[in-house]
Amino acid sequence: MQLHKDDGPDDATVTAWARLVIASRVVLGAVEADLKAAGFPPLGWYDAALELRRAGRALRPLEIEERMLIAQFNVSRLLDRMVAAGYLQRQPCSTDRRGFEVALTDTGHDLLARMWPAYRAAIQRHVGAKLAPGEAAAFGEALGRLIAR
Amino acid sequence: MQLHKDDGPDDATVTAWARLVIASRVVLGAVEADLKAAGFPPLGWYDAALELRRAGRALRPLEIEERMLIAQFNVSRLLDRMVAAGYLQRQPCSTDRRGFEVALTDTGHDLLARMWPAYRAAIQRHVGAKLAPGEAAAFGEALGRLIAR
DNA sequence: TAGAAGTCAATGCAGCTGCATAAAGATGAT
DNA sequence: ATCATCTTTATGCAGCTGCATTGACTTCTA
């Protein structure tokens, strides 16, 4: 236990932070590299497609933004690229003529199906295999707290 | 407990992975934003300067690369920028004429000293305050395992 | 010690990100 | 209904990243 006069983080917190910075770079990079090596598009494409499949309906860019927690202008461009690649299609929004909705095309559904085996293997290789058995749950809990609020 | 026939990740691992992707983006972004709002350069600059102070001597780009786990060409350009900003200085390497060493300037030492209060506060706000008491140690352990190997 | 192979660092290019702002439509107050 | 305000999405620009390659030097082999 560390004594301190201010409200700064304790040593364990600083260590956790420093490792979070490194680990996210290393693990994200490794998973992305595996996917790319297998000829697939970047992770963000999968994530966006997955949100659409989970929702079970067309979503507006704003809804994608809320779910993926990425900046508005990056959603705009990500959707552009995915539409251009044929994975998504835009359709006019019935209730707001400023916006539109994006829906998964058949090709988009197919992308999810084809990527999952490679993606799942990458997750197991770079995350699952490195955590102690049973450790993942508590680790995920802690990460969830970092996102909350 | 999940039954499966293949060697894929279990649900807790997939959840942990998904949250790692989001949490690192959210938390890194928040800390970077705090530093920027206080008029400081990006995190990577602090990290590089910190490695130099920790080492207590000039380091070669390759050594920075190993410590920060970032790509070679990104080290090259990060050092360029930090030298241009006056925080580092290059000096010829006595044992290898291909390379050189970088050393912290007085301004660089000063940067570390000036940034730390803002940085520490940001770590506490975005990480320390969100973890349950005592949780940071196990969390850091798990992150350490992800980096290892 | 010559030559092949390896290592260290920089750079041109393309693509992605952050930021500020714009354009178009929705919403709310009077 | 009108006008100001807010919301939704797109985009120009600058800077950062990944990738492939190059140039310079070192190391290894014989």
Image (cartoon, coloured by chain):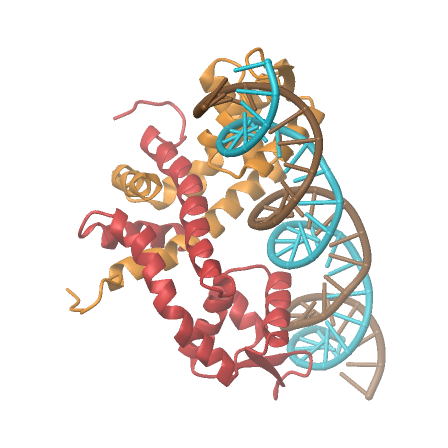
Chain colours: A red, B orange, C cyan, D brown
Q: What residue is rendered at 50% in x and 78% in y?
A: A108
Question: In the picture, which quadrant includes the C terminus of chain A?
Answer: bottom left
Q: Nearer the viewer, residue A50 or B107?
A: A50
Q: Residue at x 50, y 60 (%)?
A: A69
Q: Position of residue B73 (x, y in %)?
A: 59, 38
Is B116 left or right of A97, judged from the image as shown? left
**Where residue A1 appears, x then y in whole percent?**
25, 26
Q: Is residue B110 visible?
A: no
Say how many tags the image has: 0
* Image location (x, y in percent) of residue B127: 40, 42
In the image, residue A39 sits, relative to residue A58, either above or below, namely: above
Residue C8 position by quadrant = top right
Residue sticking out furthest to the top = B94
> Is residue A27 shown left or right of residue B74?
left
Q: Is residue A104 visible?
A: yes
State the residue at coordinates (49%, 45%). Answer: B28
Question: Can you say whether D21 is above or below B118 in the image?
Answer: below
